[in-house]
Structures are given as C-alpha cells and as structure tokens.
C-alpha cells in the first residue's frame, strides 16, 4: 500500500501541540510580549494543521461525476486559509506590542523562557524537515506550505532568542526591546502570510506549469514526433499534486487512426514518465488543412513560442 500524505499532517499537528505548550509556558513565566507573539504564531500553526488535514482528506478523494478533474484544488484553499490565519495572528501581535509600549514592563525569568523557546524550535525544525521530504515525495503544495510555515516559526524564534538575549545584559530601561522585537516578528509573519495567499491564488487561477516543465513537454513531443513537429494550443495547469496537459498535434492527413493513436500514446507516456501525476490529452489535426492552424482561437502556447518567444533553451535528448 502506498504511503498516505496524511501522516505528515499528523506530524505537523503533534509538533504544533508540543510547541504551543512550551511557548505558552515560556510566555507565562516571563511575561514577555515577544514570547507571547511566538506563542500566538504556534496557535496559528495548530489551526492551520487542522485545516490542512480536512483539506487533504478532501483533495485525496478520487474524481467523481461532479468533479471530473478530481478534488486536488482543495489544497490551495488550505494554503490560502493558512495565510489568512497568519495575518490575523500578526494583528494580535502588533496590538499586544503597542500595549506594552504604553505600559512598559521588564520580562522575568528570561533565561529559562529563552531556553524553552529554543527547545520548541528544535521540535519545529525536525518536524518541518520531515514534512518537506513528504511534500517533495507527494508533490503537495499543502505539505510544502505547512513545512515552510514551521520553518518560518523556527527562524522567527531564533531571531526572538537573539533579540531578547540582549536584555540579559542591559539595564531595565531597555525594556522597549521586547515590543520592538515583537513588531519585527509581526512584519515577518505578514510576509509569510501574503506569500502563502499569493501561491494559493496562483493555483486557483490555473497558472501554467513552470518553464522547466514546459521544456520537458516540448522535448517529449519532439523526441516522439520529430524535431519539426507542429503543435499548438498547449494548455497546462496544476491542481494539488495533479498536472493537466492538453494540446493540438498536427500530423499528415494520410496518417491512419492507428498510427496517430500509437504516436499520441508514446508522447503521453514519455511526458507522464517525466512529470509525476500528469494527465495528458492530445487532439490530432491534419497538417495540410488550413483550419488546423487555429492557435489564436484555441488559446494556449504554440511550440514555436516555447522554443523561441519564451527564450528557453533547446530541449536535450534524453538518449544522448
């Protein structure tokens, strides 16, 4: 039985629960608004992990009569929701920081608090690295977003430790460092949130596959149909881990149905061998018919656009 990507979400939820307890403990014993901001971000991690689990359960459902392309786009909703949760947490951090500016206080038991945060960061770091391997294995934007969020939490915590560590060697009048660091962390969190929202939006808007994958598609077509192959209307998109590719292939009008079918099957197999979870649809048209050259009406990319207009390198023959 193949491995389910769900287990990586369970790792994320477990890590968030552990770090939430640790960071909340650190905040309570120090009364540091900086550590409060760190604890709030961990609460967001937990909420995002639970939402991701629900979204992944939906995304893994097979295609049905109502969703003939499957449910993979549910992953983009998860990463978008995670981005929104991060932005909400940032607002809470800024609010708490402003209050601390207006009512300054020196954090207590700072050494113990920072040690607890360092321990929680180690938990997040290990979990993030494991989840990133899972994201690569399953080609999942949801797992990638969750892992990168945990890594962001690690680096913000390290910055927090470095910043608040200065207060161990400064007089009480330097207590303003605490809310300043919290606001800096909020800014970093906002950047992460918008990055996740942007990636979610791109997926929902059916952005074309990246250029390196277009090169693979173009190379596969030409290796099977010849370097002078003519095709157009190349449309690509990705929904979760699934890639969808369709285009019009122009062949000689004398080609038989059987030979055209065999060629298309060869092209499809070559593309699917190089791109995971790829679904390819090819429409064959006669090369001699003027109506076949309808790229503008069909939309998508032409083969010449991929190789020339986009300034991409020539495809390499995998057999060389």
Image (tube, rainbow, N blue to C red):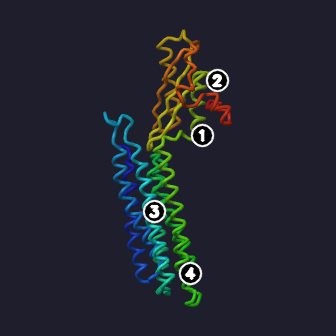
User: Who comes first in sequence, dot 2 or dot 1?
Assistant: 1
Query: Where is mark 2, residue-wise?
Result: 227
Where does the image place residue 5, in percent across and percent down from the top left?
39, 50
Please tell me how crowded label 2 is: few (under 14), some (14-19), or many (20+) other residues with Cα within 10 Å: few
Label 3 to label 4: alpha-carbon separation: 23 Å
Where does the image place residue 246, in percent across and percent down from the top left?
49, 29
User: Who comes first in sequence, dot 3 or dot 4?
Assistant: 3
Please tell me how crowded label 4 is: few (under 14), some (14-19), or many (20+) other residues with Cα within 10 Å: some
User: Who comes first in sequence, dot 2 or dot 3?
Assistant: 3
Query: Where is mark 1, residue-wise?
Result: 212
Q: Is residue 51 left or right of residue 242?
A: left
Q: Is residue 83 left or right of residue 308?
A: left
Where does the image place residue 175, in percent across and percent down from the top left?
54, 85
Query: Where is mark 4, residue-wise?
Result: 177
* CB under 8 Å between discs 4 and 2: no
**Numbered circle sitting on residue 258:** none
Label 4 to label 2: alpha-carbon separation: 64 Å
* CB under 8 Å between discs 2 and 1: no
Give the mark toward the camera: 1 or 3: 3
Q: Secondary structure at mark 3?
A: helix
User: Who comes first in sequence, dot 4 or dot 2?
Assistant: 4
**Nearest the camera: 296 or 12?**
296
**Numbered circle sitting on residue 86:** 3
């Amino acid at each position: 039985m193949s491995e389910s990507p769900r287990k990586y979400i369970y790792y994320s939820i477990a890590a968030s629960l552990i770090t939430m307890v640790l960071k909340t403990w650190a905040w309570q014993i120090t009364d540091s608004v900086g550590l409060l901001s760190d604890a709030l971000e961990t609460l967001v991690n937990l909420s995002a992990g639970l939402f991701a689990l629900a979204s992944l359960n939906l995304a893994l459902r097979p295609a049905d009569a109502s969703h003939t392309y499957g449910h993979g786009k549910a992953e983009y909703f998860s990463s978008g929701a995670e981005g929104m949760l991060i932005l909400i947490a940032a607002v809470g951090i800024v609010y708490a920081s402003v209050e601390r500016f207006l009512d300054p206080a020196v954090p207590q038991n700072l050494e113990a608090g920072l040690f607890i945060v360092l321990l929680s960061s180690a938990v997040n770091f290990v979990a993030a690295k494991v989840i990133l391997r899972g994201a690569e294995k399953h080609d999942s934007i949801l797992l990638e977003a969750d892992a990168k969020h945990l890594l962001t939490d690690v680096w913000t915590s390290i910055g927090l430790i470095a910043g608040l560590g200065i207060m161990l060697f400064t007089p009480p009048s330097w207590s303003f460092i605490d809310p300043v660091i919290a606001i800096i962390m909020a800014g970093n969190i906002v950047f992460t949130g918008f990055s996740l929202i942007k990636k979610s939006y791109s997926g929902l808007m059916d952005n074309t596959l990246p250029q390196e994958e277009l090169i693979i598609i173009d190379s596969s077509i030409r290796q099977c149909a010849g370097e002078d192959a003519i095709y157009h209307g190349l449309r690509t998109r990705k929904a979760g881990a699934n890639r969808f590719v369709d285009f019009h292939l122009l062949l000689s009008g004398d080609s038989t149905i059987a030979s055209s079918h065999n060629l298309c099957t060869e092209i499809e197999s070559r593309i699917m061998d190089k791109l995971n979870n790829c679904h390819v649809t090819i429409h064959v048209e006669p090369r001699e018919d003027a109506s076949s050259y309808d790229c503008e009406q069909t939309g998508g990319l032409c083969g010449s656009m991929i190789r020339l207009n986009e300034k991409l390198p020539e495809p390499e023959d995998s057999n060389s």
